[in-house]
Each structure stands twice: as structure tokens, then as C-alpha cells.
Amino acid sequence: MYQYTDFDRRFVQERAAQYRDQLTRRLNGQLSEEEFRPLRLQNGWYVQRYAPMLRVAVPYGELNSAQLRVLARIAREFDRPDEALFQAAQTKQDAIGGIPAPALSYGYAHFTTRQNLQYNWIPLEKSADVMDLLASVNMHGIQTSGNCIRNITADERAGVAVDEIVDPRAFAEILRQWSTLHPEFAFLPRKFKIAISGAEEDRAATAWHDVGLQVHRNAAGDVGFRVMVGGGMGRTPIIGTVIREFLPWPQIINYLEAVIRVYNLFGRRDNKYKARIKILVKAEGQNYIDQVEAEYQRIVTQDGAPHTISQAELDRVTASFVPPALLGSQHVSAENVHALLAKTADEDKNFARWLQQNVAPHRNPHLRVVTLSFKRLGQAPGDATADQLDASALLADQFSAGEARVSHDQNLVLPWVAADQLPALYQAAKDLGLAKPNIRMLTDMIACPGGDYCDLANARSLPVAAAITERYQDLDELFDLGEIDLHISGCINSCGHHHSGHIGILGVDKDGKEWYQVTLGGSDGSALSGTPKPGKVVGPSFSSAEVVDVIDAVLQVYSEQRQHGETFIDAVQRVGFEAFKTAANAARHPSNDEALSPAA
Amino acid sequence: MKLLSHTDELQAADLQLGNDADPLTQNLQGVQTIELHFPSFTDGRAFSQALMLRRRCGFNGDIRATGDVLVDQLSQMQRCGFSSAVLRADQSLTKGQELLTHFSAFYQGDVTQPQPLFAR
């Protein structure tokens, strides 16, 4: 992991002190809420449905165990609503009706699709104390909200993947530093999200971002970036346009400066739904690209390309990302490891399934990449209690050189696990309820917090997620269905990435009631999912009670029509959308016929 | 950076540049003061415009921020090339001065310090 320098540490502390001053001015009335709003937002503090929400930045998803313990402490000591507030919130939620809903809860953190963490109940008066606590482990909420360059996301297997061409972490860190408190780009037309990957397989959904970066090598073996611009979800799902096939790596900051400056000057500010860079790129097309290239040339020739990354700087940052020294596994031969795993798998079918789904190969043949599943009955997707965060810290220390990563699928990844330790890790994770062998399966769904917590949501995500989780508890059935991306968003902002789900569910509001639009055939751009694209809507939206039956019906078509070994998404492509659409619409409940009229 | 109160008597700027104007096409002959207006403090176009006036046009005169100018954005303005700012009526000059020096340094280069931290 990146080792913070004295400068890096002081910077985070100065930021925490700056925020404390701003909060003090807000609390004593010197700052209006309108003026305080962008200041708190650029530190990760929202005000949600019932309480403030804090989003903590986890740069490119990497966490160490000390950070996990502080995050646990914040969950335990600060994520505690006032009793009356909590009861009032629960009463309001209970009044919504629909399918059975899990109760609201507190004392936990939520992993987000942008590899960050969120808390839902911290009182704003205590926010500066929390920022100090975060700063004690080099953490913060800088630019986790607001119309600025957000926290940069990356491949969860960066630096350990077997299909990696170039480790993107040093570049992600250099870009994190460059974008932090950028003076020119703090008030862009809209938020700005960058994702970076450096492997054959795109595990960071790069094409779906404002800027997607893929580090690769050209024919000469030089390292550079494929630069995509203008991808995004929301109301207008658009796949990013490649504007540079190969940009030499030292130029990436200079080039991004041009990309974002042109956006800052010309992006729309009159309508927030048309303010993302994707709308500018779509409207201007080649003209946008020409403007960026012209500005880039001026940065190089007139400014002297001041942000050209030097080899010395790349080397300095890269030195932080050397593989940790690990003991043990190197002394166990591959044959013995294989025998040990085969024996354990023979004795325990679920261990075999866990090896298949939750364990991935590692560039070091003695090691494996293990995903702890935070998708299970009784807790919302991606939620981790204070105790679970502490326990994860312990697992990271015992099995993964003290490192864990938040995946954009809302799980925790342990990147440095010795192969011969897998049975022990499995047992420990199982005891914690984090060894469900469902990674990439239907129940490893992405879901936003939705209308239980989020102020923007049109409908709740969590009751639907809970109903689907409950319905698909049978592992034999789950494994028979194979790998399926199910993504749920509570509103069109698409935090739950419904556009890219093989099955997407979008919460919509009709006359104050919750409805759910279902899409099929979306792709995040991974090898399983194919070329990135948004799913297609199957028809008018469904009631919450119908959603599980619709999914059942769609999967029934798959079960009947699939060819040997064919995945769900491949079957949708081959068989065609219509058969699935017809089945989905046939699953409507008769009593809800009146619901057919409001198209979503 | 010179902080001004809205009650200060100021000479009118030689050039008032609209937020949609292209700094590169302006005739800056004889211009000593350019005013860039913030219609709202969340509209960040003037940051890029100020930077281009300094870096691309080689403008050495005064670049003055007016409009919705709040103390919490002064440091950004200074780093983008503004040399003076007329604070909104309810803003404190003292607080503004204090906030200008809150951070000891920044990562990225800017108009006042073109080199990024790693190249200094």
C-alpha cells in the first residue's frame, strides 16, 4: 500500500482542521447552510433522509487493518442516532407498506460501488471529531461528494491479478494526489468520476465513467493509457468514447487537465441532468476531442507541461506497492497445497464452492485472492457492523499482510492469502458469516442504500434485495444458475449500477408508491458480461411484490433454453430479448393490472 | 492577494470578462485590470479563465474576483491567478486573510507555483 509521507499526513490533518473551522462557523451561525453545503459535501458530509451521511474516501479501494479498526470504532461509537430520531424514522419507513422490509439499523458501515464507505447516522455536531479520528489513520472524506473530481476507483485485483498488463496503483495514487484540492476543478458543472485498470479484463467498469483509463503497452512495449471520456449512467446511460488509444504515461496529468478544463468551461450548468461530461461529449463529438487536443498542445508547448510525471516520482510511489513479505506458503509445495485443498473440498462441498467462486488466482502462484462475501441473509448488501469490521481487520492481519480492498461489488477482498492457509481462512470467515460462496452469483447483488436512507431515492432497494436474497438461498439452485450480475438502484442516479446489470432493477415513484423497472442484458464490460452496454427495459414497472417472481420467470426461460455451459448473459444475447421480456411481463400479479398503465 | 470590501471605492476594471468569453481571443492591449464575475460561488468557470489569462495570455495586471466571493474559495482564486477579490458584503476580511494561508502547501502546481509537489 502507499506509504504516507510527512507531507501527506500533514495535509490530511490540515484538511481536518479546516473542516473543524468550517463546522464551527456553521454551528455559530457565521455560515449559512447554503454556503456550508458545498464545504461539507467536499468532505463527504451529506444530509440524507433522516440524518447526515458520511462518505469516507478509500482511494482505489485499498485499506489496511489499522484503518479498518478505526472505521469499526466510528461505526461503534459515532454511528448512533438519537433514540427519538431513530424511532421516528422507523415509523415513517413502516408506513410505506409493500413487501416486508428489514428494519433500519445503525452501528455499521456500508461499502459503496465506488469502493468507499458510508455511515448513516453520525450527528453533524460530531463530524469534526470523526474527521480527526479518520486523519489519525490517513483517512478523510475529501472529494467524496460535490461537483469535483471524486475518489478514483481501480481494479480490486490491481497488482495481484494474473491477467495484469501494468499495475495501475502507482498511477491511481499519483492521480489521487494531483486531484486532491485541485484549485481549478473544485466547482465543475457536475461530479467527475475516474476509474483505472491495467489488466486484460476490465474489473473497474472503466467505460461507464466520466474518464476511464486503461493502462496498457503499445507494440514497442512502452506503457501508456487508453483514455475514454464521457461514459456514465444516470438518466442517459452512455458508454465512454476512446479519445486516445495510447497516451504515454508521463503525460496523463497534463492530458486530464485539458479534458477537464474544456469540460469546466463548456459543460452545461443550466440543467443538472445535462451537466455531466457525457452530455458535452455526445453533443460536441469530434469538436470536444479537437478542443481537448488543442488545449493539451497548449499545456505542452506554452505551459511547458509542468505536470509531466517523472520517472523518479513514478519510482518513488511504486516503491510503496512492493508485494509484502509473506512467510509460510513458499515452503509448501504446489502438490501439497493441491492435495490439502482437494481433501478439504472433498469433505466439505461448500468449501469447494467457496474455492470456485470466492478464491481467484494470484500472480504469485503461492498466493490467492480471496473475497469475503458481504452478501448474506439478514444484512443489506455491503453492510458491515463494527464487529465485522474489526473481525475483517483481524483476518487481514492473519491472512493478508494486513491489507484488504473494498470491491465495487461491495465486498472485501483479501489480496495476499497463502494458498495453504485457505482452509483456515475459510473456517474463520465462515464463523463470521463472511464465507458465503456466492461471489459473482445472483445473490452477490449490487444494491444502493435506496429509500431506507437516501434522500434522492424514489423507492427502497433493500427490501427487494432482501426478498431476492431469501428466495435464492439454495446453493444448488444458485450454482445451477451460474454467474449473473444483478444490480439494484433506488433511483435513476444509478448508484446501484442497474444499467450494467445482466438483470437491472430500478426503483421509480408513481403517485407516491414504489415501483420497479426491470432491465435485461446490461454489461459492465467484464469478460463474463461482454461489451459494455445498458440493459433494455422489459416493460412498465412492477410492484415490489412482483419483482422476485419476474426474476424467477426470467431465470426459468434461461433454464429451459440454455445450451450446455451457457451463462445467463450469453443466453440473453443468443435467444434474444423478446422471450425473456414476454416471460417477465407474464409474471405480473393479476391484482395489479391497473399498474400496467403507468410506464416508467 | 488583495482582499477588498464591497464598501471600498474601486476604479472600474478595464475589462469585464463574461463567464462564457474565451480569454484567448481578447485584446488585452493597455488593459491593467480584468474583472471576472462569480454569478454563484459554485460556478467554477472563472477559475479556468483566470488561469488562462495568466498562463496563455501572459497577463500581468490585476485579475479581480467579484460577485459571489466567499472566504472559503479565496485560496482557490489566488492559486488560479486572481490578484484581488471583492468579498461579498457579509464576508469577513479578517477570516478571509486567515484562510488564505491555512494549508502549508498543495500537491498540484498552480499559477503561483507552476511545479507540482513532486517536481519542486
Image (cartoon, rainbow, N blue to C red):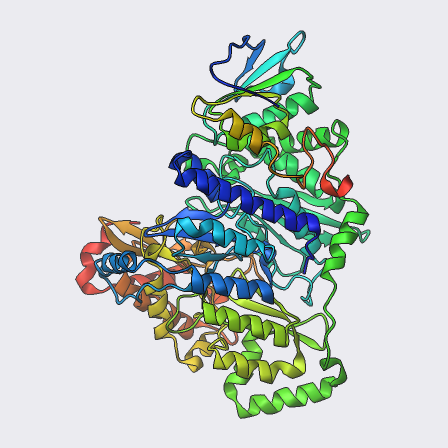
Residue at point 56%, 34% (across, down): A285
Q: Is residue A463 left or right of residue A341?
A: left
Quadrant showing the N terminus of chain A? bottom right
Q: Is residue A41 left or right of residue B26?
A: left
Residue A394 in which image quadrant: bottom right
Q: Is residue A484 above or below residue A182?
A: below
Q: Is residue A253 above or below residue A296?
A: below
- Of residues A205 and A378, the one nearer the viewer is A378
The quarter of the picture where residue A520 lies is bottom left
**Quadrant of residue B90 within the rendered picture:** top left
Residue A152 in the image: above or below residue A394: above
Q: Which residue does the image show at 46% across and 43% down from the upper left?
A: A41
Whether residue A534 is visible here, answered yes or no, is: no
Residue B92 coordinates in the image, percent (x, y)? 48, 26
Residue A446 location, x and y as percent?
45, 62
Q: Nearer the viewer, residue A564 or B66?
A: B66
Q: Nearer the viewer, residue A385 or A355?
A: A385
- Residue A256 visible: yes
